Image: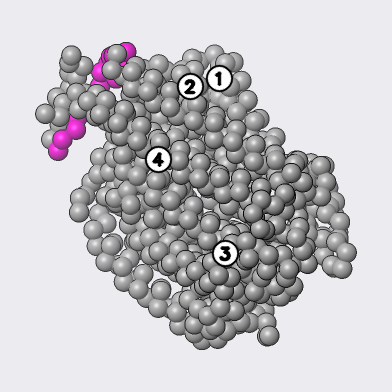
């Protein structure tokens, strides 16, 4: 087998077809974009089912599809642990956040955080943390795009891969500029349908090879794995030492609490007309995401059984190539072409969602509210948002080129840890705790942000991991230096409780007490929807 | 009971004033709504987090126990993992049923009264 699989021409043709079809839809959708609400929220006119599908499209990123399948193929049960955390996390969004946020806010996460607190400092803090989380998430997706091309498109070498990252980035900027939230949402819906259909097809195919018996498939996967029966048991990746076990607890905590703090997920709840539709969105999202993770369990073990861990580990892109290689093994060139086009579409849809979120946060929170003190027309705000989208897109392209050799899972886990530390405590406190104050919010957001990023900086993922036997490079980001003192890869275990504690401490020591009139407004509005933003267009 | 002194604006749905929100927050209807919402959402959150972390802790600290096969190659760990999917689906279904029956009618009543929808 060569370093590429299948026919790059076929892969490229299917991908171009996806871009052409979605571009037509985005241009059609954009004809109705007139107001700021149209640009940021698609006029709040999507149904719960449409939005739920788009959320699944937004959430099932390259890290989910390629990363989890690869993790299960190589480490078996321990890879499965990721998908459980990613799924259970949705209950936090369903029970505590989605509907209340829809009723309280307008365009961004900061609308909710700053609702009853001092606008300018809290909005600034929320915008900084939104940009930080979105940026790490963006880097992960762009880095994934770089790794994928070498396998799927036959593009090798630094220049070729960098060019591909640039193409992905430019396409995403066009989607966002032309289509706004409505266009982005349609790209995500189409991508979610293609991704889940493709995964369903492959799952059925794999199971049919083993008489639709999961136990037989697991047996075949274990037989073909260097881990043997240990592939099916917990501990292949995280069970080695007490430290790695604690690290896994820390990661689990970030996964389960991070989702409801991801700004691009939160912003999606503003695209529906009512809180009831927001609830329906989450139900659709949970169903689709749950089904998809069940598929990925079969695909991961299927890749271990049919492709083999050695081939996967040696392929360009490593673990991330498990799903495409399985597609090639099953359906040859055509299925591989379809799955690789879906993988690209995945990256494109997720980066578009992240870009619109980050640009909305900059234009709405920083520019309109903090810099211009709300004395700015909606048109000017949207113009700034479009410029911000281009700037963020350019940064994402440059960052993606620099980060293309980095571990995708690390960058995504970092985004989840930062979201769970910097965003979630303040969201929950401001929705549910009467005594929460501006100082509490600032301490919690900045404390969570600085501690999570700081601990990662001094963790083994950045420096100081020993070079494994048979390898030439350390798994750390930096080679040849060691300044780590924090023992865990993931900071969640420390930074999440710290941010909750700081939010409480800042509030009880704040000489300015909380505004009870604003709290009444927020509480009544969040639970009843009285005074909530209405849809601006109807279908 | 009338808690709205700000008539509906054109286009449906007026914006209630701050006094109206304070009054609504103190109304027995709203106190009941909050009780029904928190009475379901808070204990359920604690329950699913405990259940999730039980699974996580068992996977790393009781991996031998989790590795015992139950049926063919399917071991306890996989069954408990799949049960996390089942419990997530179940809690989602229970919450939607609770919200449709117990929360939405009351929330709609309070909202329409405040916004002056006829």
User: Residue B93: which numbered mark, if any?
Assistant: 4
| Front: mark 4 or 1 | 4
- As for residue A359 lying within the magenta part, the answer is no
User: Residue A433: which numbered mark, if any?
Assistant: 2
Q: How is the image coloured?
A: one colour
Sequence order check, earlier mark of 2 and 3: 3
Sequence order check, earlier mark of 2 and 1: 2
Indicate the chain on which mark 2 is placed.
Answer: A
Residue of label 3? A213
* Residue A155, horizontal then vertical, whole percent: 61, 80
Marks 2 and 3, how far apart at CA: 50 Å
Which is nearer the eye, A70 or A278?
A: A70
Q: Are marks 2 and 1 in contact (CB under 8 Å)?
A: yes
* Residue A15, horizontal then vertical, whole percent: 46, 76
Would residue A507 be visible to someone looking at this image? yes
Quadrant of the image for the N terminus of chain A?
bottom right
Residue of label 1? A507
Q: Residue at x 37, y 75 (%)?
A: A20
């Amino acid at each position: 087998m060569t370093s590429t699989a299948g026919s790059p021409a076929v892969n490229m043709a299917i991908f171009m077809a996806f871009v052409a079809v979605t571009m037509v839809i985005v241009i059609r959708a954009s004809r109705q974009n007139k107001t700021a609400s149209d640009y940021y929220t698609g006029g709040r006119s999507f149904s719960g089912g449409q939005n739920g599908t788009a959320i699944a499209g937004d959430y099932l990123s390259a890290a989910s599809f390629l990363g989890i399948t690869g993790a299960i193929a190589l480490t078996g049960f321990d890879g499965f642990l990721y998908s459980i955390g990613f799924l259970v996390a949705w209950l936090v969004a369903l029970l505590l956040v989605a509907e209340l946020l829809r009723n309280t806010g307008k365009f961004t996460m900061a609308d909710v955080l700053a609702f009853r607190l001092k606008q300018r400092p809290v909005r600034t803090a929320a915008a900084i943390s939104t940009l930080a989380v979105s940026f790490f998430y963006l880097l992960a997706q762009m880095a994934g795009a770089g790794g994928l091309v070498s396998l799927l498109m036959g593009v090798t070498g630094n220049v070729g891969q960098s060019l591909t990252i640039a193409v992905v980035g430019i396409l995403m900027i066009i989607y966002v500029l032309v289509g706004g939230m409505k266009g982005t949402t349609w790209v995500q819906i189409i991508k979610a349908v293609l991704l889940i259909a493709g995964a369903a097809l492959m799952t059925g195919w794999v199971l049919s090879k083993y008489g639709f018996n999961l136990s037989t498939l697991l047996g075949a996967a274990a037989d073909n794995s260097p881990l043997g029966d240990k592939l099916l048991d917990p501990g292949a990746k995280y069970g080695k030492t007490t430290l790695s076990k604690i690290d896994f607890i820390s990661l689990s905590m970030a996964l389960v609490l991070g989702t409801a703090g991801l700004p691009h997920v939160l912003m999606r709840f503003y695209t529906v007309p009512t809180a009831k539709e927001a609830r329906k969105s989450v139900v659709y999202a949970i169903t689709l995401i749950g089904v998809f993770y069940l598929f990925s369990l079969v695909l991961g073990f299927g890749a271990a059984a049919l492709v083999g861990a050695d081939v996967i580990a040696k392929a360009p892109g490593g673990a991330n190539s498990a799903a495409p290689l399985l597609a090639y093994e099953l359906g040859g060139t055509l299925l591989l072409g379809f799955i690789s086009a879906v993988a690209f579409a995945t990256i494109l849809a997720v980066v578009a969602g992240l870009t619109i979120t980050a640009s909305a946060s900059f234009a709405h929170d920083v520019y309109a509210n903090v810099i211009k003190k709300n004395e700015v027309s909606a048109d000017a705000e949207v113009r700034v948002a479009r410029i911000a989208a281009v700037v963020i897109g350019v940064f994402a392209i440059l960052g993606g080129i620099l980060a293309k050799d980095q571990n995708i899972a690390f960058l995504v886990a970092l985004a989840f840890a930062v979201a769970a530390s910097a965003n979630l405590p303040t969201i929950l406190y401001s929705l549910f705790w009467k005594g929460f104050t501006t100082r509490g919010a600032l301490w919690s957001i900045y404390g969570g942000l600085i501690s999570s990023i700081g601990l990662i900086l001094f963790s083994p993922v950045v420096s100081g991991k020993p070079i494994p036997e048979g390898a030439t490079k350390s798994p750390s980001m930096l080679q040849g230096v060691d300044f780590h003192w924090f023992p865990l890869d993931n900071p969640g275990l420390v930074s999440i409780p710290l941010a909750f504690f700081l939010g409480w401490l800042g509030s009880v020591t704040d000489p300015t007490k909380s505004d009870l009139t604003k709290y009444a407004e927020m509480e009544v509005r969040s639970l009843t929807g009285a005074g909530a933003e209405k849809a601006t267009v109807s279908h | 009971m009338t808690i709205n002194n700000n008539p509906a604006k054109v286009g449906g749905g007026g914006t209630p004033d701050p006094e109206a929100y304070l009054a609504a927050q103190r109304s027995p209807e709203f106190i009941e709504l909050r009780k029904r919402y928190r009475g379901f959402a808070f204990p359920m959150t604690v329950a699913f987090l405990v259940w999730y972390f039980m699974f996580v802790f068992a996977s790393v600290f009781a991996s031998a126990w989790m590795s015992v096969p139950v049926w063919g190659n399917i071991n306890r760990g996989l069954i408990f993992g799949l049960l996390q999917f089942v419990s997530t689906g179940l809690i989602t279904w229970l919450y939607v049923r609770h919200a449709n029956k117990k929360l939405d009618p009351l929330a709609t009543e309070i909202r329409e009264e405040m916004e002056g929808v006829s």
